[in-house]
Image: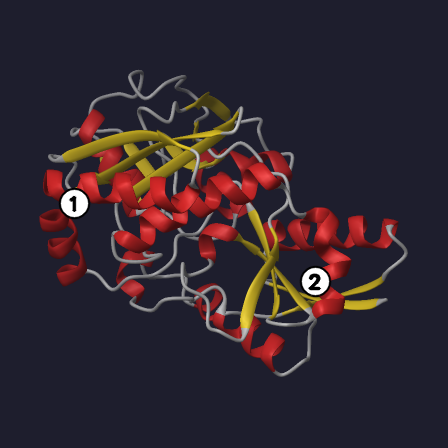
Amino acid sequence: MRLRIGSRGSQLALWQANHIAGKLRERGNQVDIEVIHTTGDKILDVALSKVGSKGIFTKEIEDALASQKIDLAVHSLKDLPTELASQFEIAAIPTREDPRDALCSADFSTLEDLPHNAKVGTSSLRREAQLRAIRPDLVIHPLRGNVDTRLRKLESGEYAAIILALSGLRRLGRTELVRHVIPTEVMCPAAGQGALAIEIRAGDDDVRSALAFLDDKSARSETKCERTLLTKLGGGCQVPIGANAKFSGGTLHLQAVVASPDGKNVLRESGLGSDATELGALVAGRLLKQGGAAILEQVYAHAGPAPEQP
């Protein structure tokens, strides 16, 4: 079968597309990769929380899918809005990489080791809020660009440390500056972090069948739980919400956080369950009752929602 994969042009996105292409070729498929430049790739001088549109890393790719220029799209799952348009579906969520965040630094081993008023780079309001809760003295600067660009800025001394998704660093073989993998209890990851999503046109049975072997039951269950929580809290947005589900022995354990951007108010909840949707909704409800609704109302009033970059 001939399959055309749509992908963003970043180094990490192309690694992901080539990874899936390799697995499909092993099954005898002929695979081509089409690079598609998205809005999010073009706006590099503005913090993501200020961009103000959902799907900024996916819209142009979905347009190509809808017009049949490509047959499937490989995304970082956390880039995908939690509610897909009805003409699309997620055909597979492959085995997930470690979802945790990593502290990268040339000189410092942990968050506690960072000097007073140290400059730390992050692209994410979620990371920033949880960081401020632990170390309110740190000077946090927006950090955009691909993984190589961010690491280069760190190596040149612009930052004492930066925080990135461990999954992207591992996939690119760039873990040499990882000093500390931050526990989920300290910094709860983004919903879907570490997971890929393969999106197709809804009802495309042939392509769905060709991709079925890639779907991982645990990864799908975990990310469904996390994304349900995100939906109940207001959607797949660049807001200070973390969600991390672990599937083990038929049971899901979900940790979640809602934080005010200044880190002064951090709400954490967790729960156990066997149904991903029910558990996500249950923990979201607890967070909203605990005061999450007021925090999120304030965030949505001040920042345009947009997906988070790896």
Q: Amino acid at mark 1?
A: Leu
- Residue 178: percent from the left, percent from the top? 50, 26
| 162, above or below 2, in the image | above
| 25, above or below 5, in the image | above
Residue 280 visible to the viewer? yes
Q: Nearer the viewer, residue 134 or 80?
A: 80
Residue lying furthest bottom = 67
In the visual, does 91 lie left or right of 138? right
Classify 10 Å Cα crowding around label 2: few (below 14), some (14-19), many (20 and above). many
Residue on which the image places disc 2 = 208
Q: Amino acid at mark 2?
A: Arg
Residue on which the image places disc 1 = 288
Residue at left offset 39%, top offset 44%? 226
Q: Secondary structure at mark 1?
A: helix
| 178, above or below 201, in the image | above
Residue at left offset 56%, top offset 37%? 218
Q: Nearer the viewer, residue 50 or 292?
A: 292
- Residue 180: percent from the left, percent from the top? 44, 21
Q: Nearer the viewer, residue 299 or 87?
A: 87
- Residue 6: percent from the left, percent from the top? 65, 67
